[in-house]
Image (cartoon, rainbow, N blue to C red):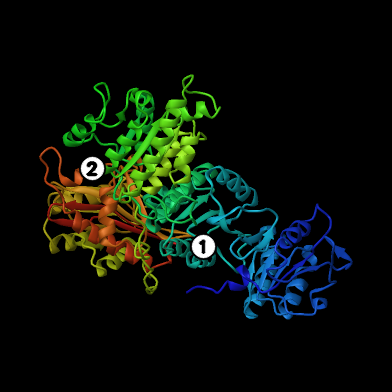
């Protein structure tokens, strides 16, 4: 069930330690906000000098309050922080919000102080938000302990940045979005992002969770909590594109960046990953359109709460340019804009005139000026079409009513058109009520017009920018969230540490897990080489061991037909490289095969992260790879393989037969499970994994210990 945060969000009483009349101090801002609801619960102001603060008598200490206090906000200089926490716990506090800074963010000594305080809070059975945070607010319980107001609504905002939270609040207002809760995460010394996501997922008044985080703490636990939340989670994070580990010793390590890891975790958990505060607001506005006309916490509206069945989008416009731009934006956002089928086109022609386009985009071609209700007729017809999952309407709609409302644009004397357009908006809302979960998003040149307001008040997201409309629709369409956390597979129990990280030790580890390899023997001299060759028939492969990249160093010889060729290759290679050991292996049949790479890299935040892609010596050049949190179940592995740019090769091209993708996926599951059970392995890689029509075979493997 997660931690009990009742005392944090609905305390019986509150005290602000460090309350002040000085507007320059944070204790002034928090105290001012706390007093907005004095009748909901007792609010005590504490200032060591006593006197009055904000016109109220201030206690000189928490002890002087003379009664237990459920939640204590501490905004005092760092030197007095620990004493303030100890006094709060002694006075019965079950929750502490620590504004005071100068702890983990200040270096090792501050981190040690922070850990000691958090330990004392936990030992007392209390919870701590911060330190180095900017407070909390809960509109549903009238708890106001942050410096700013947040309009009420259904979004829980969990942020590591106060300024970003304020920007999101400002951007949300034009869309009618509001907030159920706000929590400034601070250093997460005790209450973590994971704790808060779990609690907000149980909070009935919260229907979407917005997160800005730079430090996930336990990233895998965050992904699992988001997957299990049962409501949308939207993530904005920084530093996604900074770089791979430059000390990586495998292709997997060199190809894995922070951006890849975060994107994989979000995809696996069903989290909407966004890049900017604007995009976060756009996505939240789209998700609000699923929840109803008054935003995420409002009553059900047209098509409320049901995501579309798929991503097949009809683009509907009243101008060719807008339609073309919107179609491109929709496809850029991951939507599909397929040509509509003949029967659907025939039905559309019955309500359009001859010059209208019905293929997709569907273009009124000026008909709206003759008959504004044609907008509603077309939206209704498109929503009724079985081959359409969602509709993106774009262009001039709103302009006629805008002219009548004095907003500019629209034809002179357009009152009749304005009235017709407003009627059309109302009919569009009526069509949505029976659209069986098919969303509509609107881009308008006049998003503030009366007719667009009719749509917005009914829960239809309306945007000025085409790309915003497309992104919002992508958030509403065809990405069903997992109903449980099965897409974030749990880590297996740790296995005994790998004792031999050499080539044959890694092969043995994987072989024991069911990963198939060709026959092989490790040798150190010519006698051993000839003995190995006698154990299995040629052709042979010879590999020099203990080299980072054997192929790059000329340490691999293939297709050695017999023992004589094997011996000659050994003598030449040993004279050139002088490797301490070699591997003699049976040469695999490469006919009709495709080389893949399967690797796992240990991420410090998200744990083992798997990579699958096109393998062989060109892996880093081609960079055709996909990522997921490890371990990767076989069904998920097959989905990843089919998401590659080169996936068509798996099904056969130019007369080549299809390869056994199911066998490859099963091997991916075994490799990633082994890696997930061995946290001491920083990088584990099989490259290439040969996949043929009759199965899969690992041809090379390596591991790098932490």
Mark 1: few, some, or many residues within 10 Å (few <14, many ≥20)? many
Q: Is residue 585 visible?
A: no
Locate residue 405: give its quadrant.
top right
Residue 664: x %, y % from top left:
22, 56
Q: Are marks 1 and 2 in contact (CB under 8 Å)?
A: no
Q: Which residue is mark 1?
A: 205
Q: CA distance from mark 1 to mark 2?
A: 35 Å
Which secondary structure, mark 2?
A: loop
Which secondary structure, mark 1?
A: loop
Q: Is residue 331 left or right of residue 281?
A: left
Mark 2: few, some, or many residues within 10 Å (few <14, many ≥20)? some
Locate residue 65: give its quadrant.
bottom right
Question: Camera-side residue: 619 or 340?
Answer: 340
Question: Camera-side residue: 497 or 386?
Answer: 386
Q: Which residue is mark 2?
A: 387
In the rendered image, the vertical position of residue 76 relative to residue 403, given as above or below: below
């Amino acid at each position: 069930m997660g931690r009990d945060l009742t005392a944090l969000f609905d305390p019986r009483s509150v005290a602000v330690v460090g309350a002040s009349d000085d507007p320059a101090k944070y204790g002034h801002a928090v105290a001012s906000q706390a007093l907005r609801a004095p009748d909901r619960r007792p609010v005590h102001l504490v200032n060591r000098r006593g006197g009055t603060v904000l016109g109220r008598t201030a206690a000189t200490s928490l002890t002087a309050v003379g009664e237990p206090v459920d939640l204590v906000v501490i905004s005092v200089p760092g030197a007095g922080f620990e004493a303030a926490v100890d006094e709060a716990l002694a006075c019965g506090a079950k929750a502490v919000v620590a504004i005071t800074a100068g702890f983990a963010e200040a270096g090792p000594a501050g981190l040690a102080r922070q850990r000691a305080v958090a330990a004392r809070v936990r030992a007392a059975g209390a919870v701590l938000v911060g330190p180095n945070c900017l407070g909390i607010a809960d509109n549903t319980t009238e708890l106001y302990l942050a410096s700013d107001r947040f309009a009420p609504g259904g979004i829980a905002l969990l942020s590591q940045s106060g300024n970003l939270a304020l920007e999101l609040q400002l951007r949300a207002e034009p869309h009618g979005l509001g907030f159920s809760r706000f929590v400034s995460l601070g250093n997460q010394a005790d209450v973590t992002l994971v704790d808060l996501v779990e609690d907000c997922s149980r909070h009935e008044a919260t229907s979407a969770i917005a997160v800005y985080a730079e430090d996930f703490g336990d990233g895998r636990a965050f992904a699992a909590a988001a997957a299990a939340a049962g409501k949308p989670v939207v993530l904005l994070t920084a530093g996604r594109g900074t770089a791979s580990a430059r000390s990586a010793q495998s292709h997997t390590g060199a190809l894995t960046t922070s951006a890849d890891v975060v994107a994989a975790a979000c995809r696996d958990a069903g989290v909407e990953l966004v890049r900017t505060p604007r995009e976060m607001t756009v996505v939240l506005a789209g998700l609000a359109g699923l929840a109803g006309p008054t935003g995420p916490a409002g009553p059900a509206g047209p098509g409320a709460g049901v995501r579309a069945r798929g991503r097949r989008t009809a683009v509907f416009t009243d101008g060719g340019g807008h339609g073309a731009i919107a179609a491109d934006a929709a496809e850029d956002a991951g939507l599909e804009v397929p040509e509509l089928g003949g029967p659907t086109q025939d039905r559309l022609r019955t309500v359009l005139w001859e010059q209208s386009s019905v293929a997709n985009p569907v273009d009124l071609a000026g008909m709206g000026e003759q008959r504004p209700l044609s907008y509603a007729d077309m939206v209704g017809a498109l929503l009724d079409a079985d081959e359409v999952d969602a509709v993106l309407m774009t262009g001039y709609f709103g302009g006629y009513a805008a002219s009548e409302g004095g907003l500019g644009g629209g034809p002179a004397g357009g009152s009749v058109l304005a009235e017709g357009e407003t009627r059309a908006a109302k009919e569009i809302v009526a069509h949505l009520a029976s659209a069986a979960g098919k969303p509509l998003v609107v881009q308008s040149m006049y998003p503030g017009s009366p007719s667009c307001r009719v749509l917005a008040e009914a829960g239809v997201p309306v945007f000025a920018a085409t790309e915003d409309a497309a992104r919002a629709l992508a958030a509403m369409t065809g990405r069903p969230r997992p109903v449980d956390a099965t897409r974030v597979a749990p880590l297996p129990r740790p296995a005994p540490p790998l004792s031999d990280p050499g080539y044959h030790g890694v092969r043995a580890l994987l072989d024991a897990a069911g990963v198939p390899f060709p026959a092989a023997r490790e040798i150190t001299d010519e006698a051993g080489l000839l003995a190995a060759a006698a154990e299995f028939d040629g052709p042979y492969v010879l590999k020099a061991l203990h080299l980072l990249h054997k192929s790059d160093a000329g340490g691999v010889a293939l297709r050695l037909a017999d023992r004589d060729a094997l011996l000659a290759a050994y003598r030449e290679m040993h004279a050139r490289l002088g490797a301490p050991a070699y591997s003699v292996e049976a040469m695999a049949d490469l006919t009709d095969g495709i080389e893949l790479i399967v690797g796992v890299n240990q991420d410090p935040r998200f744990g083992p992260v798997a990579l699958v892609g096109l393998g062989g010596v060109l892996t880093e050049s081609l960079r055709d790879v996909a990522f997921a949190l490890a371990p990767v179940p076989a069904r998920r592995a097959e989905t990843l393989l089919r998401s590659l740019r080169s996936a068509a090769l798996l099904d056969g091209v130019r007369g080549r037969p299809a390869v056994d993708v199911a066998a490859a996926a099963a091997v991916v599951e075994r490799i990633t499970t082994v890696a997930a059970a061995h946290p001491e392995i920083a990088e584990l890689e099989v490259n290439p994994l040969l996949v043929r029509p009759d199965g899969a075979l690992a041809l090379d493997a390596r591991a790098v210990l932490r």
